[in-house]
Amino acid sequence: MSKDKKRKGQSKLAFPLGLAVILFAIVGVVFAVGAGIDGVKKLTDNSAKKLEYETMLIPVVMYDPDMFDDVSSAKLDQLTVCAVWGIIKDEKNYPGKYETDDQGNIMIPAEDVEKEFAKLFGNDAVPTHIGVKGNFDEFVFNEQSRCYLVTSAGTVPIYTPKVVEIDKTSNTVVLTVGYLAAEAWAQDSAGNFIQPEPSKYVKVTLRENDNGYYISAMQTTDSPEDAQPGVTLPTAAVIPTPDTLEEEVSDEDSSEEETIDEKASDEESLSDKDSSSEE
């Protein structure tokens, strides 16, 4: 395998991998600010759990597969697309884990797709290796090499996930997930991300097996009435940059110094009055 071919294959994935990193950055920044609203820059266990679920859901929500009451009745081609993107967005796989073919396409073995599929959707269903087409991507399955060929130059996700509620029982977790339209994200003149309100909400049921939690059902649901304001940002909420946060801290320090100076001045005034009275 020549270095030129490998470089060509890696460059084909540069955009989608970069996009995945941006998605993680957006989710991470929104999560950090949400936690900061509820307690000054303090990360709560609940917020950390929400981020964990959001990270898990990114390759699924980004493609918005059809809803299903049970994974065994879901459209397997759609879930297979999610599994392939679950591999692509995992930065531990790049660069260099997968080889490229003569056309420079990344070759992802069917075995790896099956493992990712099981991690996301459990063992009640398995992908049918016939090649799949997503909203903007086509993953060709090569029977001879038993690999999926990643031929796309990139994609724009439909949605990014925002977990607003967690309802946990003994071996089941039900998530209320807000779907944030990717095209609705914006930036202000200072470069701060502006988070949109969810376009819709989906109830995602996770069940537990020996390998952890997997998605067993996805159902459209109504907007939750008791969504926690400290976690989900309102429409057009501006996410502050580190510089802004530093300025806010600096302003608070200045305010405290002014208060101390005022107190000292008041005490000095009282002292002068007492001295005048004694005279």
Image: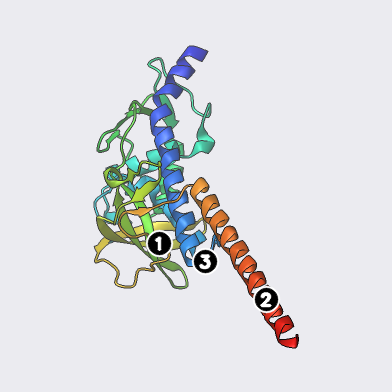
- Work out whether mark 1 precedes mark 2 in sequence or the reverse, and give the earlier one: 1
- Work out whether mark 3 precedes mark 1 in sequence or the reverse, and give the earlier one: 3
Which residue is disc 2 drawn over? 267
- Work out whether mark 3 precedes mark 2 in sequence or the reverse, and give the earlier one: 3
Tell me the crowding category of disc 2: few under 14, some 14 to 19, or many 20 or more residues within 10 angstroms, Cα based.
few
State the CA–CA distance, disc 3 to disc 2. Answer: 34 Å
Percent coordinates x, y for residue 241 in the rendering: 47, 47
Is mark 1 in CB contact (under 8 Å) with mark 2? no
Percent coordinates x, y for residue 204 in the rendering: 34, 61
State the CA–CA distance, disc 3 to disc 1. Answer: 29 Å
Q: Which amino acid type is shown beneath numbered disc 2?
A: Glu
Q: Which amino acid type is shown beneath numbered disc 1?
A: Leu
Q: Residue visible at 39% across and 68% down? A: 228
**Height in image: 27 above or below 46?**
above
Which residue is disc 3 drawn over? 39
Is mark 3 in CB contact (under 8 Å) with mark 2? no
Q: Nearer the viewer, residue 236 or 127?
A: 236
Give the left or right position of residue 200, taking residue 176 as reference. Answer: left
Where disc 1 sits, the SS reads strand
Query: Where on the picture, by quarter, is residue 232?
Result: bottom left
**Height in image: 238 above or below 170?**
above
Which residue is disc 1 drawn over? 206
Q: Residue visible at 61% across and 69% down? A: 262
Q: Is residue 154 visible?
A: yes
Disc 3 versus disc 2: nearer the observer: 2
Disc 3 versus disc 1: nearer the observer: 3
